[in-house]
Amino acid sequence: MLGLLGLLASGCGGGGGDGSAPLMEGSTQSRSLSSAYNGTTYPLDVYVPPGSESARATLPVVYLLDGPSRFRTLVDIAEFTKTRVIIVGIGKEDLRGRDYVPPNACTPFGGGHAAFLDFIRLELSPFIEANVGGHPQRRILLGHSHGGSFVLYAMFAQAPGAHHFSAYLASDASIGCMEGTVNGWESDYAAAHSSLPVRLHVSYGGNLVNGTFVLRLQARQYSGLALAAQLYGGGHIGMIPAAFADALAFALP
């Protein structure tokens, strides 16, 4: 882990003696997809690991929120750790306050989260699996801050057996901006279901209310839930490389 963090801190990829970044072993491509659910066209950054042409249909896919800000960090982690995973960074970060969260105390214009989940489930995933690759039972959702809150929404929005993702990775979720709403998602889910058969990684640094939420989940004793939670140093942004690396490893046991 120390080697990885040093690599990321040195400028997203490290480099040789001349300070240049090493050649990427995998490849990246740019695509875009328009949604009928909210009328938005989303730019997409896609990473595929090296030597994966014949095996892409079997690979896990990470759907990464805040793609423009977070894509290269996660790609560097995958390259450094030799993790064979497709990464899809979802753009339009300027709409995160609409797409990721319900109305909340921190940002205006919330409420587009249901339509955005429909976009990912019904449009984006089929598009990626048809045109790039990925196994339907190995989908992963990763988000930070408001993106982390969206990860929790997506998890509680579907019943056992219907979860679109096998792993949900919530990084320093902005629960404090909408604590009653997030607790309501969990309470409604618990009232209907005793099992939560997914892998959930909760990382937190600046938003300590995540720790309280983890205790809430542990008290439920959901069957089938594989839960990992960890407090990170570095603050809300500085924690990202370590949290993302641990979350990715947890999602792919």
Image (tube, rainbow, N blue to C red):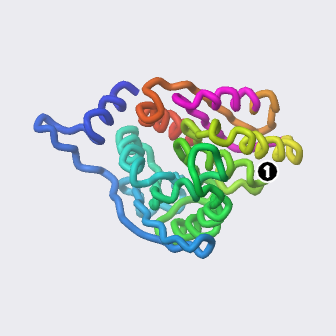
Q: Residue at x 71, y 54 (%)?
A: 163
Position of 8 with respect to 137 (left or right) is left
As helix, strand or loop, the secondary structure at mark 1 comes to: loop
Q: Nearer the viewer, residue 174 or 14?
A: 174
Viewport quadrant of the C terminus: top right
Viewport quadrant of the N terminus: top left
Q: Residue at x 43, y 35 (%)?
A: 237
Position of 231 relative to 113 (above/below) = above
**Spot occupied by residue 118 in the image (x, y as percentages of width and height):** 65, 65
Q: Residue at x 45, y 31 (%)?
A: 239
The question of residue 215 being in magenta is answered with yes
Q: Residue 98 falls in which quadrant of the image?
A: bottom right
Position of 196 with respect to 129 (left or right) is right
Residue that numbered label 1 is attached to: 160
* Residue 61 shows up from this direction: no
**Spot occupied by residue 246 in the image (x, y as percentages of width and height):** 50, 33
**Spot occupied by residue 147 in the image (x, y as percentages of width and height):** 55, 48
Provide the residue span drawn in magenta: 195-216
Position of 184 with respect to 253 (left or right) is right
Q: Residue 137 falls in which quadrant of the image?
A: bottom right
Badge 1 crowding class, 10 Å Cα cut-off, few under 14, some 14 to 19, many 20 or more, is some
Position of 153 relative to 120 (above/below) = above
* Residue 183 shows up from this direction: yes
Q: Residue at x 61, y 29 (%)?
A: 229
